[in-house]
């Protein structure tokens, strides 16, 4: 008879390794990766180069800890930088350990985990657990209010500047009372500390915090409440940190405090890929790991599974010029492949033509457009490529740009829901109390705000008091009463109704949906579609609180591809991605390295720029093509430019230089170029030119196929007046109502009621 209890017999087990006895999740790891997975005790630093499988190591290590019974799922703190990385880690761990992954409550981003801790102990920093996390827009509005209240010129001392300074201080773990003399004089002639203190005090009144507060409040709680810190020391037996090289001072201090408990902290990162210094990242955090954690095990992952030998050789040779690094050399057993190509072009247009021709040749050889990426140092470099691609009908997408949650109509809808959730959210109240127009003017709103600040209560509470007096009269008083009554009704419905259904009711009953439905502007239909999408997206969350917190914390919204398209993005946006073919244009002094970065940060910034170049090269799997120009149009001015110093730092054995435009004597990197320059090849013998001529001779017309839009007839060849005659009453979208004085074909002279006499095209007006 089997003496093992049924519960143990039926318990889930880690994947079997078969006859070898090796767990399945350890199979396929190389020696260094396996060492990083199995080194579970004490501090461990995994120096993982680009494409060396660091994500696999991190997820396998987490699964190994669980599978071997070293800790329960809720005893592991696993921190990433982006929601995307957190989702990917959870999926990978789930593939190894199964449903047990759902028991990992402490797997997420720095901010999401800090938010969890803060909600549990909010009272210790003067907040309620229902606090609101402000977005950038609300933060700027709050700072503007403070500047105006203090009599500071917000045109000279802008809210955005102060917001940036405050964010920087919080990234460094500095509270208002700890602000140094130098920092104090960075804003408003020595008033920075006062404004910072007023901002923090106002946040407490609003029961709100910003992103920086999430970690800063955590530090305050841990340092001033030893019992709370001890609680988390007991809870977290293992700590895993991804992208450790990107941590700022505040994140570093937070991790140090939590790691004092068990000491079992594993940080995975690459000092050669630290490229976010401009947003507070400190590469020194990873460089001094062994000093911070004496006896730490350092494991280097150097075998690359992404790129060819020549690409790795070029990247490794380049990064060796940096002094502040721990040192490692990437290698691969795969084919060395093609050398990194370096091309000198005459100007930006020639560079765009060259890149487009290379793309067409690459695609004709059987590859896809989405196998290609163009990585630029600054977004202004994209224009020339976009112009060229549109002309040729090449499908492309720009990674970046306006995001869904940053649209005005979405922010308005969120403000309604935030106010329903928290009556103390004054910023939400201010945003939507008169949206749509209710007759509650700016004067009434300012009167409520001033009284609320004076009394130390929320604007909602003060508004409820003021409508019972003569402080607010007439239409504004009635409208405000109706608005407050609506909010209270919605708040009561929130207890018994699904949050997505409630959101739809709020938008309808408030008149917000009707406002856009009645709006005749071309953008109105799109705004309504966005609101519909908003309601649909809310259905994927269990509660309104969960949804609003997701919106506040999400920092890496994915842009879905619409098809087979070339990716155009900045080098910073490319980190973590890979493509078979990568173009790296604009490698010129003042452009890359950036002159602004060098002016602001000197040698440290130069090394970060070099790390950025390293990241760019290592995005390529098979081919990397670097280009520079002799002349560059920079912000409207033609400038003669020199090749980037990074080009001559590329090892000659891994890089190949060519010039197709007669650009010789460019330096050592271009020695030995023997190909004669043909001034006509680039423009008149390119694949694009040949294709155009062939299409012209055949009478065929190329359909771009990827550029979508709606045509609008501005003015046709018909010189008629479109049925308009002298004396007709018309309406113009911009100028309003008026009467036609002269009808001359498609050109009308109209005397507008408010705008005066204007000349307009007939297609821009309609009969009134």
Image: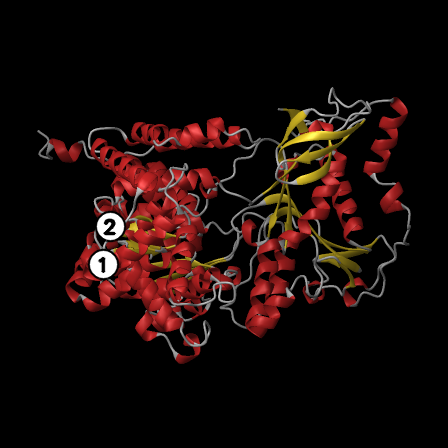
Residue drawn at x 58%, y 30% is 522
- Badge 2 crowding class, 10 Å Cα cut-off, few under 14, some 14 to 19, many 20 or more, is some
Q: Is residue 763 left or right of residue 617?
A: right
Horizontally, residue 382 falls left or right of residue 153, namely right
Q: Give above or below for 58 relative to 559.
A: below
Tell me which residue sits at (17%, 61%) in the image: 228
SS of the residue under disc 1: helix
Please provide percent x and percent y for residue 262.
23, 62
Tell me if I can see residue 298 in this picture: no
Q: Residue at x 44, y 68 (%)?
A: 152
Does 67 sit above or below residue 675?
above
Residue 485 is situated, as x and y percent measured from the top left of the image, at 24, 36
> Which circle marks residue 455 in the picture?
1
Disc 2 + disc 1, Cβ < 8 Å: yes
| Viewer-side residue, 536 vs 503 | 503
Q: Residue furthest top?
A: 723
Tell me if residue 645 comes above or below residue 536 in the rendering. Answer: below
Q: Quadrant of the C terminus?
A: top right
- Label 1: how many residues lie within 10 Å, few (<14), some (14-19) or many (20+)? few
| Residue 723 placement (x, y as % from top left) | 74, 19
Judging by the rendered image, the residue that carries numbered circle 2 is 462
Q: Which numbered disc flags the more N-terminal residue, 2 or 1? A: 1
């Amino acid at each position: 008879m089997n003496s093992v209890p049924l519960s143990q017999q039926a318990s889930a087990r880690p994947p079997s390794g078969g006859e070898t006895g090796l767990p399945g999740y350890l199979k396929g790891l190389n020696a260094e990766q396996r060492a990083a997975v199995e080194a579970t005790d004490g501090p461990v630093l995994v120096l993982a180069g680009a494409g060396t499988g660091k994500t696999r190591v991190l997820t396998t290590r987490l699964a190994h800890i669980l599978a071997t019974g070293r800790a329960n799922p809720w005893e592991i703190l696993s921190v990433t930088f982006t929601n995307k990385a957190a989702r990917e880690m959870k999926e990978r761990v789930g593939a190894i350990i199964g449903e047990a992954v759902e028991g990992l409550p402490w797997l997420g981003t720095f901010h999401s985990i800090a938010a969890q801790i803060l909600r549990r102990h909010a009272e210790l920093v003067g907040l309620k657990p229902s606090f609101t996390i402000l977005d950038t827009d609300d933060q700027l509005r709050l700072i503007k209010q403070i500047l105006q209240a203090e009599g500071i010129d917000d045109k000279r001392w802008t809210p955005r500047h102060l917001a940036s300074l405050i964010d920087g201080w919080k990234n460094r773990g500095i509270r208002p009372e700890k602000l140094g003399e130098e920092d104090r004089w960075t804003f408003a002639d020595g008033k920075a500390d006062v404004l910072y203190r007023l901002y923090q005090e106002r946040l407490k009144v609003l029961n709100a915090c910003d992103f920086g507060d999430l970690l800063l409040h955590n530090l305050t709680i841990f340092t001033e409440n030893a019992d709370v810190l001890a609680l988390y020391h007991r809870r977290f037996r293992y700590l895993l940190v991804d992208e450790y090289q990107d941590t700022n001072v505040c994140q570093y201090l937070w991790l140090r405090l939590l790691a004092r408990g068990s000491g079992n902290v594993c940080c995975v990162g690459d000092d050669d890929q630290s490229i976010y210094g401009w947003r507070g990242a400190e590469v020194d955090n990873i460089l001094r790991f062994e000093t911070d954690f004496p006896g730490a095990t350092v494991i280097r992952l150097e075998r690359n599974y992404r790129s060819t030998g020549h690409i790795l050789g070029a990247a490794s040779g380049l990064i060796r010029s940096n002094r502040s690094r721990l040192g490692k050399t990437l290698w691969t057993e795969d084919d060395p492949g093609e050398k990194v190509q370096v091309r000198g072009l005459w100007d930006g247009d020639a560079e765009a033509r060259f890149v487009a021709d290379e793309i067409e040749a690459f695609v004709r050889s059987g590859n896809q457009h989405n196998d290609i990426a163009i990585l630029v140092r600054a977004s202004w470099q994209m224009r020339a490529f976009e112009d060229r691609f549109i002309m040729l009908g090449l499908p492309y997408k720009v990674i970046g740009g306006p995001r869904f949650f940053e649209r005005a109509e979405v922010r308005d809808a969120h403000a309604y829901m935030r106010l329903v959730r928290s009556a103390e959210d004054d910023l939400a109240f201010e945003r939507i109390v008169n949206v749509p127009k209710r007759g509650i003017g700016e004067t009434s709103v300012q009167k409520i705000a001033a009284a609320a600040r004076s009394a130390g209560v929320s604007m909602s509470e003060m508004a409820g008091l003021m409508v019972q007096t003569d402080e607010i009269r007439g239409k504004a008083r009635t409208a405000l009463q109706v608005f407050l009554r609506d909010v209270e009704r919605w708040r009561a419905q929130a207890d018994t109704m699904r949050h997505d259904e409630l959101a739809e009711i709020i938008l309808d009953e408030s008149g917000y949906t009707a406002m856009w439905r009645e709006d005749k502007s071309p953008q109105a239909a799109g705004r309504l579609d966005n609101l519909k999408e908003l309601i649909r997206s809310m259905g994927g969350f269990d509660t309104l609180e969960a949804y609003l917190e997701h919106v506040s914390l999400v920092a890496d919204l994915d842009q879905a591809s619409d098809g087979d398209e070339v990716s155009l993005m900045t080098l910073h946006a490319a980190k973590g991605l890979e493509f078979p073919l990568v173009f790296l244009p604009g490698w010129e002094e003042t452009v890359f390295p950036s002159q602004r970065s060098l002016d602001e940060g000197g040698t440290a910034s130069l090394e970060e720029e070099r790390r950025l170049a390293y990241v760019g090269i290592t995005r390529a799997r098979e081919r990397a093509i670097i280009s520079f120009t002799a002349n560059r149009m920079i912000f409207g001015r033609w400038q003669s430019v020199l090749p980037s110093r990074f080009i001559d730092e590329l090892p000659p054995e891994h890089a190949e230089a060519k010039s197709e435009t007669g650009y010789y004597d460019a330096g050592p990197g271009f020695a030995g170029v023997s190909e004669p320059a043909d001034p006509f090849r680039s423009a008149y013998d390119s694949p694009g030119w040949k294709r155009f001529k062939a299409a012209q001779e055949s009478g065929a017309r190329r359909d771009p196929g990827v550029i979508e839009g709606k045509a609008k007839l501005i003015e046709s060849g018909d010189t008629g007046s479109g049925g308009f005659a002298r004396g007709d009453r018309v309406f113009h979208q911009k100028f309003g109502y008026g009467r036609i004085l002269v009808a001359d074909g498609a050109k009308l002279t109209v005397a507008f009621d408010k705008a005066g006499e204007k000349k307009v095209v007939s297609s821009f007006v309609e009969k009134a």
